[in-house]
Image: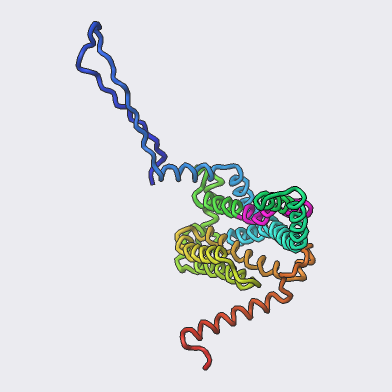
Amino acid sequence: MNILRLSARPVARLTGGIRAGSGVWHLEKIETRRCFSVDSSVVGIWGSLSNSTPVAYCQQALVDLHDLSGLPWWASIILSTVLLRTVVTMPLAIYQNKIVARLEKISLEMPDIVKQLKMETAVAMKKFHWSEKEARIMYNHSLKKQWNNLVVRENCHPAKTMILLWGQIPLWVMMSVSIRNLVHMLPDPGSIEAQITFTELTLGGFGWIPNLTEVDQSLILPVAMGLINLTIIEIQNAARTREPSRLQKIFTNMFRGLSVLMIPVAATVPSCLCLYWVTSSACGLGQNLLLMSPRFKRLVGVPLVPSEIARPYQHIKATFSSRFDALLAKVGLGPK
């Protein structure tokens, strides 16, 4: 890969003639060409991220947890991942579920508001002699205002439904870069601490992966990560009580494709990094299943809404069973 390069190559030419009335040579206009490299830009961005302060804190936290716990590195990575998912992403997921439930509750108030606004608009059209266009503009403005009032009242702006994504992705990136730094002894390969950590990683493996700095040649971890991510997507899809929209179907298929594409990517990274990805995905699966429980939702303060499934696990099981039977029937292996 090329090193960051942004080269400027000046080209200067002396004219061969002499200006009239002057006895000096003169220099022509200097042309400067700048060559931009995509590879160098990626290296620059990755280098900035690798040396950033949040990554440094995450990296030091990993080393401190390993030193204080006395656990081997494979167990330290799993423990740190579970702790982060429990302390950071679980509260965000609970809060996001509360926002979604509040949005559904205020949406139930909208039919009565719409009915009232239509009556008031009809009266206003006669009283103020509004045209159809003017009445429609005022109606839409009032409807939007009423919706915003409900959102403010319940403190449930729709943008907050993405709060888990905003918290989870940066955390995942920082942890991934931190573990990569440990493997490559960054940011200072010459330091004794970095060399000690690297040596510990080479000896801190488990089972079929004794060296955590090498890739998982068996592909067990990469395939496990892909299967877990696909399971999360299918469970979320099966938990829907309504027919998914076209946009939801597009996103579902896109995430399915990304889950499959991540398998060859995970097969090329150090096994300690792949272990973190697998553990994070497994925690995400458990988190999704736990947040489907009505009892747990009431325990953490998520309000009851009409769309909530009383027995979500039985519903998911029945959905998977019906899809499997439909697949067998499609290929001619179903019951006759």
Locate residue 131, reporting x and y percent.
67, 50
> Residue 287 versus residue 27: which sits nearer the camera?
27
Locate residue 95, reporting x and y percent.
72, 57
Please tell me how many numbered marks the rendered image carries: 0
**Residue 180 lies in the magenta stretch:** no
- The quarter of the picture where residue 293 lies is bottom right
Locate residue 291, reporting x and y percent.
70, 67
> Residue 234 versus residue 241: which sits nearer the camera?
241
In the rendered image, the residue lying farthest to the bottom is 336
- The coloring applied to the image is rainbow
Residue 11 position (above or below residue 65): above
63 left or right, relative to 115: left
> Residue 194 versus residue 186: which sits nearer the camera?
186
Q: Give the residues in magenta.
A: 146-168
Residue 140 position (above or below residue 224): above
**Residue 150 lies in the magenta stretch:** yes
Residue drawn 56% across the image and 68% down it: 228
268 left or right, relative to 62: left
- The quarter of the picture where residue 118 lies is bottom right
Residue drawn 24% across the image and 19% down it: 14
Locate residue 162, reporting x and y percent.
64, 55
> Residue 263 versus residue 143: which sits nearer the camera?
143
Residue drawn 39% across the image and 39% down it: 36
Please name the predominant secondary structure of the magenta segment in the image: helix
